[in-house]
Image: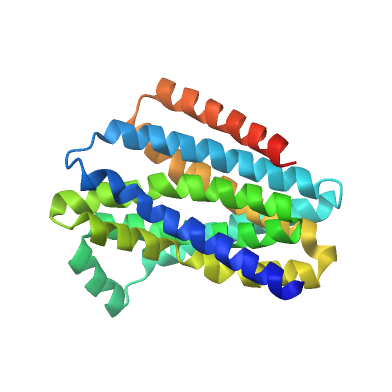
Amino acid sequence: MMQTNVWTVFWAALLTALACGLGALPFFFVHNFSRRWLGIFGGAASGLMLGASFSLIFEALPLSVPLLMLGSIAGLAGIHALNQRLKQDKSASLQALRKSVGVKTLLILAAMTIHSFAEGIGMGVAYGGGEQLGLLIAAAIAIQNIPEGLAIALLMVPLGTSPLRAAWWAVVSSLPQPLMAVPAFLAVTLFKPVLPFGLGLAAGAMLWMVFAEVLPEALEDAPKEVVAVVVTLSVTAMIALQAVLG
């Protein structure tokens, strides 16, 4: 049973990573894409991630409020520290990558990769709390990965990168999801008492990503009124999805 669950988690997380490559799909047909749409997609991603975070929190509340709070703070601190560390990294390999893909593109890729670590942990922890919760979180992350892939394509394709190569970079940025999901799942499965902490950890990291990265970028590309409507509709859709799966 454990083996089956591990593979279920891995394949679900791998599918969410592959979904990121779908963001480049429009560029196979249209080469000039309005950034307003990126803002709208970013708003949708924010709403889905907010809904997913609330699902994790509500799952943990009946188990242990103190552990939930500690986990949320740890998730917030951890993802912020990782983000700062990556921005300050001046290694030779990173410098070479900056030259090959451009500084702005690299920063986007770095941000997406940081997100993917937290999202992978979130999926693994969610599956530890039950298959329905895991499926809900995986579906939300897969959907919100598409506009992340679009963001990468919007930067790379106009500079001469082929849509296929842009899709590849998008998938690479999401590979930490399957790599982190299985260890996170095993950890909470073996240590059930710390499940509320793990759920809070994932929720805290995802909330930080929404308000520090995804939502501010959406507001730069689309009017705030439009983004607000899309975020609200996305949260509502996430709640509805949770009701259906529950």
Q: Position of residue 96 (x, y in %)?
A: 23, 74
Quadrant into which the N terminus falls: bottom right
Q: Position of residue 10 (x, y in %)?
A: 58, 67
Residue furthest to the top? 225
Query: Would residue 117 be visible to someone looking at this image?
Result: no
Residue furthest to the bottom? 92
Q: Residue at x 64, y 72 (%)?
A: 183
Query: Would residue 209 be visible to someone looking at this image?
Result: yes
Q: How is this picture coloured?
A: rainbow
The relative height of residue 26 versus residue 176 in the rendered view (above or below) is above
Quadrant into which the C terminus falls: top right
Left or right of 227: which side holds 120? Answer: right
The relative height of residue 6 versus residue 63 in the rendered view (above or below) is below
Left or right of 45: which side holds 40? Answer: left
Towards the viewer: 236 or 14: 14
Image-quadrant location for residue 51: top right
The relative height of residue 166 versus residue 34 in the rendered view (above or below) is below
Q: Residue at x 27, y 56 (%)?
A: 105
Towards the viewer: 172 or 14: 14
